Amino acid sequence: MTNPKIKKKDRALTVSWIVVAAVYAAVFAAEQVISPNSMLFTVLKKGATYALVAVSMNLLNGFTGIFSLGQAGFMLLGAYTYAIFTIPLEHRSSVYQYFNGGVVQFTLPWFLAMILAGLVAAFFAWLIGLPVLRLKSDYLAIATLGFAEIIRAILQWNQLGPVTNGSNMLRLFPNFNSFNILKADGSVAVYLSTTVPFLIAGVCIGLIVLLLHSGYGRAFKSIRDDEVAAEAMGVNLAHHKQLAFCISSFFAGVGGAMLAMYQTTVQAKSFTTAMTYEILLMVVIGGVGSVTGSVISSFLFVACSEWWLRFLDNEQFIGDFQVPLLRNGFRLVVFSIIIMVVVLFFRRGIMGTRELPDVIRALPGAVRSLPEKMRARRERRSASRKEAGR
């Protein structure tokens, strides 16, 4: 006889897959009918990129309990690796005009360069993980933050110019628009500049979810909950911490390559500490320990900061009356207030530790209990009115 709980769980997973498939279908359909210059696609592309990086950071901070702030550094390594190895040969002389065309004189396909970007980030994570993962909490965060700043400075060093182009930007490499399918006359037949980034992020996040549900994922969670108990159960702390650090950095490197494709140029000075703080904020708002929460908060964060609140930076007039406070920079003030409200009222984030199947599983019960909650609320109001009448 089938266990009802298992049957309900399987049903929730099926509905979750249907929801995800519907989202992808909606993105593809919207891309074909809405103008490609719409701000919607800017938000979707950047949101998909940041969703992957936020989930990779959550793997480390939320599921393993390692407080790292080096995400911007690993993204920078991934972005530079992707750009260096995908610039077409005919454009290298113009990109590396101050360094005689550079030393890399071959081009990799974008997908190989993206995998290489992740591998380079994972390699550096392995190198710095050997000493810094012995540190705890704040000390580890400071060490990884210092690593990100050092990498940013080194990549701008002119002595490395033949490889990194020094302090000059890298450009003319394949970007998201390169995924569009063109007709013979050069016009676009099928738009894929938003769908493909969604697919890349989705595959990477899916791999992270599979990892979290494996034996390694359970070992990571046990380290987060209690290192002493995990070690007593046979978990090799040093090995698993190093593994989590490298895997998280691999996907951060892939996210950096995606960010390079989104921005169409790469320059080290744009990968600042503020970028790491933004990603950490997405993780906290979504829920530390929730993959779904990190994805949702990433899109909400990008939409609010890049689109929905843009009007607050412009002066607005109602007739001859100028609306007060609306001027350049006011958007960030309102955005900060919204973040404070979310953090105050959602102490564990939007999702807490729940995932999409958990929400779908709990939805029927919540709908059934809604009339009872409304009736109880009416009874409380009636009782308070009677008390006031006395």
Image (spheres, helix red, strand yellow):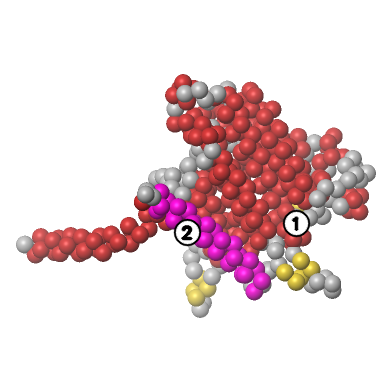
Looking at the rendering, in which quadrant would you find the C terminus?
A: bottom left
Say which residue appears at 61% left-offset and 60% top-offset.
44
Image depth: mark 1 or mark 2 in front? 2
Give SS at disc 1: loop
Q: Main secondary structure of the magenta part?
A: helix
Find residue 387 and report its image quarter: bottom left
State how far apart marks 1 and 2 are (Cα): 33 Å
From the viewer's perspective, is residue 139 above or below residue 319?
A: above
Say which residue appears at 50% left-offset and 75% top-offset.
318
Q: Bin the neighbour count of mark 2 within 10 Å (Cα to Cα): few under 14, some 14-19, many 20 and up.
A: some
Q: Nearer the viewer, residue 184 or 40?
A: 184
Can residue 191 be seen in the rendering of this structure?
A: yes
Return the x and y of residue 167 as percentages of the image width and height.
Answer: 79, 43
Q: Which residue is mark 1?
A: 175
Q: Which residue is mark 2?
A: 15
Say which residue appears at 37% left-offset and 49% top-offset.
1
Q: Which residues are magenta?
A: 5-33
Q: Nearer the viewer, residue 132 or 52?
A: 52
From the viewer's perspective, is residue 110 above or below residue 244?
A: below
- N-terminal of the two: label 1 or label 2? 2
Q: What's the amino acid at mark 1?
A: Asn
Return the x and y of residue 124 as percentages of the image width and height.
Answer: 70, 32
Give SS at disc 2: helix
Return the x and y of residue 299 as percentages of the image width and height.
Answer: 55, 56
Can residue 286 be seen in the rendering of this structure?
A: no
Say which residue appears at 55% left-offset and 23% top-offset.
236
Q: What's the amino acid at mark 2?
A: Val
